[in-house]
């Protein structure tokens, strides 16, 4: 009943973990639900290549035909990209069911953290973490990413929380969960498409060494995860006013259509992409590559 028997780990990933070499986990929901095909496949391949070019082993995580995998082949990446939203969106809640049914699913931040930790992978790169949805204080729509960050010791490198969320409440909830939140080279918590959110980052680090020291200290104490929030490069930043208008319109449409739960974020990102004429997709690809 060893963890490596429950999770299929790619040979290069397993070897790197065994030898103490750097491995970077990558989620798969961004591939299936975050971008259209073939942009999603191109992004996934580029991000893996960036990780390799910087001396680490990429480990994209997903559940394929009921097998949780840490590290995908290129054929598996392509299959997931082509499936798109028809692949299951798998949060921590859904992992056991997806495995038992022999289904194929793309893992969210929470499920990716869970499986990465089981395989001994301690660093994970994504676009943005989930959070408290706007009106979440009424609907209780709070992403499982936040509770996962409170208990699973994985460092999540991201561009902050997605702009469609209630960022002040998201930061409050992370504080309640005891998750360490750091701005990388900034004092303000970034908001995915934009470098600013109006919210102070609880902590700040200015180098990989400083970030690693914080993560190591937390791990020694048996604490949970870390959010390392890296702002999108200024040259790729979406126009703040245009993005906010698109977000407000998309949110209104989601309410009118009764879209909620785990369908919310994919719908909102798709509508924002349409309303901004594809500018938000360009920003999304740029920030993921920058985080890697």
Image (cartoon, rainbow, N blue to C red):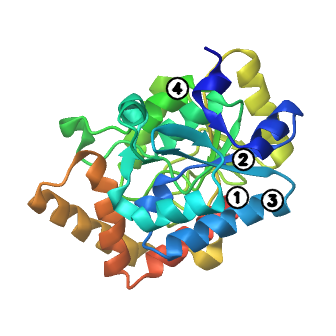
Whether residue 141 is visible here, answered yes or no, is yes
Percent x, y of residue 200: 55, 46
Residue 97 in the figure: left or right of residue 9: left
Percent x, y of residue 259: 18, 54
Q: Are marks 4 and 2 in contact (CB under 8 Å)?
A: no
Q: Dot 1, crowdedness within 10 Å: few (<14), some or many (≥20)?
A: many
- In this view, the residue in front, 44 or 169, is 44
Residue placed farthest to the bottom in the image? 277
Local secondary structure at mark 4: helix
Q: Dot 4, crowdedness within 10 Å: few (<14), some or many (≥20)?
A: many
State which mark lies toward you, 1 or 4. Answer: 1
Task: Report the quarter where the C terminus lies.
Answer: bottom right
Task: Report the quarter where the N terminus lies.
Answer: top right
Q: Which mark is residue 61?
A: none
* Above or below 127: residue 124: above
Q: Which mark is residue 150?
A: 4
Which residue, given by chain and number where applicable, does mark 1 sit on?
292
Q: Which mark is residue 52?
A: 3
Q: Do the residues labelled 1 and 2 touch (CB within 8 Å)?
A: yes
Between discs 3 and 1, the one toward the N terminus: 3
Local secondary structure at mark 1: loop
Residue drawn at (38%, 30%) of the image:
100
Residue 288 in the figure: left or right of residue 270: right
State which mark lies toward you, 1 or 2. Answer: 2
Which residue, given by chain and number where applicable, does mark 2 sit on?
24
State which mark lies toward you, 4 or 2. Answer: 2
* Above or below 194: residue 107: above
Q: Distance between the residues labelled 1 and 4?
A: 23 Å
Q: How far apart are marks 4 and 2 (CA)?
A: 20 Å
């Amino acid at each position: 009943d060893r963890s490596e028997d429950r999770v299929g780990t790619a040979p290069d990933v397993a070897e790197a973990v065994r030898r103490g070499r750097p491995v970077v986990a990558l989620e798969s929901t961004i591939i299936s639900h975050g971008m259209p095909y073939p942009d999603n496949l191109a992004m996934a391949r580029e991000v893996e290549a960036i990780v390799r070019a910087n001396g680490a082993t990429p480990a994209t995580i997903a559940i394929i035909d009921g097998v949780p995998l840490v590290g995908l082949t290129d054929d598996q990446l392509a299959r997931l990209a082509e499936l798109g939203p028809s692949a299951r969106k798998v949060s921590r809640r859904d992992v056991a069911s997806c495995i038992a049914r022999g289904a194929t699913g793309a893992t969210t931040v929470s499920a990716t953290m869970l499986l990465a930790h089981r395989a001994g992978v301690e660093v994970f790169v994504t676009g943005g973490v989930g959070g408290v949805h706007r009106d979440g204080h009424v609907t209780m729509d709070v992403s499982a990413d936040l509770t996962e960050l409170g208990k699973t010791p994985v460092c999540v490198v991201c561009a902050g929380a997605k702009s469609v969320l209630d960022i002040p409440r998201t930061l409050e909830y992370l504080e309640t969960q005891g998750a360490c939140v750091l701005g990388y080279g900034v004092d303000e918590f970034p908001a995915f498409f934009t470098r600013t959110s109006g919210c102070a980052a609880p902590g700040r680090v200015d180098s990989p060494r400083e970030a690693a020291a914080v993560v190591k200290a937390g791990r020694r104490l048996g604490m949970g995860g870390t959010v390392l929030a890296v702002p999108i490069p200024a040259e790729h930043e979406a126009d703040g006013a245009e993005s906010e208008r698109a977000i407000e319109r998309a949110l209104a449409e989601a309410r009118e259509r009764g879209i909620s739960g785990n369908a919310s974020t994919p719908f909102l990102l798709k509508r924002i992409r349409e309303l901004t004429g594809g500018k938000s997709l360009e920003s999304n690809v740029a920030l993921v590559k920058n985080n890697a």
